[in-house]
């Protein structure tokens, strides 16, 4: 389960078929039972054998959940991105917190598809970071997680052990009431006076990267200008 809330127990019969589970309360499966299959075998059947591991971290499982959903919903990677499938996550109005100090001002997210494991859930991918996953659940809760593995340098320096951690996540808890954090790519650019950057029906990750760089530089220049104005006062 993407959000990893609570513990899920699966109960099977002697033929290795799921007869009940305990996620969100005890649920007994009526009628046709669900046959368990080897996880790595299933990944191979879906063409995802590159994601198979001997041991799985939570980050691995989240990325696999997104990849499986993409397979079942028929969404495939392409060098061209449909502009209407891109939304911009604007973090500049998020509540101030040390936990998200490392965030970028803007994230460009492409729709991946529905979560086949959880009704009403939807996956997005960060166009500029293949290791990140963005997710809306059925209640509108949003989470963005950068799952890029980083070495815990302090622990490595003290013990010599390479322990990895996922460095960054931001979710709806940082949203201020009444603020808007998501918009289509075209409307985002138009509303900020960047009509010359509005794209056609399709674009590429390279174009998105250039747009992100220009908007970020402009945002940082505004912050510096504001700070200089305050110092002058």
Image (cartoon, rainbow, N blue to C red):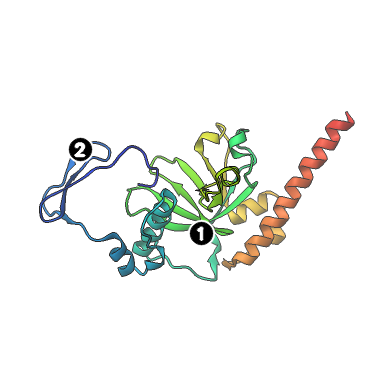
**Residue 188 at x, y percent in the picture:** 63, 51
Q: Secondary structure at mark 1?
A: helix
Residue underneath mark 2: 26
Place of residue 169 in the rendered image (x, y in percent of width and height, measured from the top left): 53, 43
Query: Where 94 falls versus 33 (above or below)?
Result: above
Q: Which label is found at residue 50?
A: none
Closest to the observer, 9 or 96: 9
Front in this rendered view, residue 71 or 37: 37
Residue 92 appears in the figure:
yes
Q: Position of residue 88 (x, y in %)?
A: 58, 51
Q: Position of residue 108 (x, y in %)?
A: 58, 54
Residue on which disc 1 sits: 85
Vertical comparison of 9 with 162: above or below: above
Whole-angstrom CA distance, mark 1 to mark 2, is 37 Å
Residue at 60% across / 33% down in the picture?
95
Mark 1 or mark 2: which comes first in sequence?
A: 2
**SS at mark 2 in the image:** loop
């Amino acid at each position: 389960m993407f959000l990893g809330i609570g513990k899920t127990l699966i109960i099977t019969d002697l033929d290795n078929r799921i007869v009940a589970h305990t996620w969100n309360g005890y649920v007994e499966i009526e009628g046709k039972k669900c046959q368990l299959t080897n996880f790595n075998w299933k990944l191979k059947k879906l063409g995802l054998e590159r994601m198979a591991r001997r041991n799985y971290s939570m980050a691995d499982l989240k990325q696999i959940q997104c990849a499986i959903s993409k397979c079942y919903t028929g969404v495939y990677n392409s060098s061209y991105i449909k502009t209407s499938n891109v939304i911009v996550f604007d973090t500049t109005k998020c509540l101030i917190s040390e936990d998200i100090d490392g965030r970028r001002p803007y994230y460009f997210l492409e729709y991946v598809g529905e979560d086949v494991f959880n009704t009403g859930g939807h996956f997005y991918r960060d166009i500029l970071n293949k290791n990140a996953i963005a997710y809306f659940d059925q209640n509108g809760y949003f989470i963005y997680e950068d799952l890029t593995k980083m070495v815990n340098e302090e622990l490595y320096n003290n013990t010599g052990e390479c322990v990895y951690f996922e460095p960054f996540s931001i979710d709806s808890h940082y949203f201020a009431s009444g603020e808007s954090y998501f918009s289509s790519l075209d409307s985002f650019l138009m509303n900020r006076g960047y009509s010359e950057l509005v794209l056609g029906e399709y674009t590429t990750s390279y174009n998105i990267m250039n747009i992100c760089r220009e908007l970020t530089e402009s945002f940082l220049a505004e912050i510096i200008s504001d700070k200089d104005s305050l110092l002058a006062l």
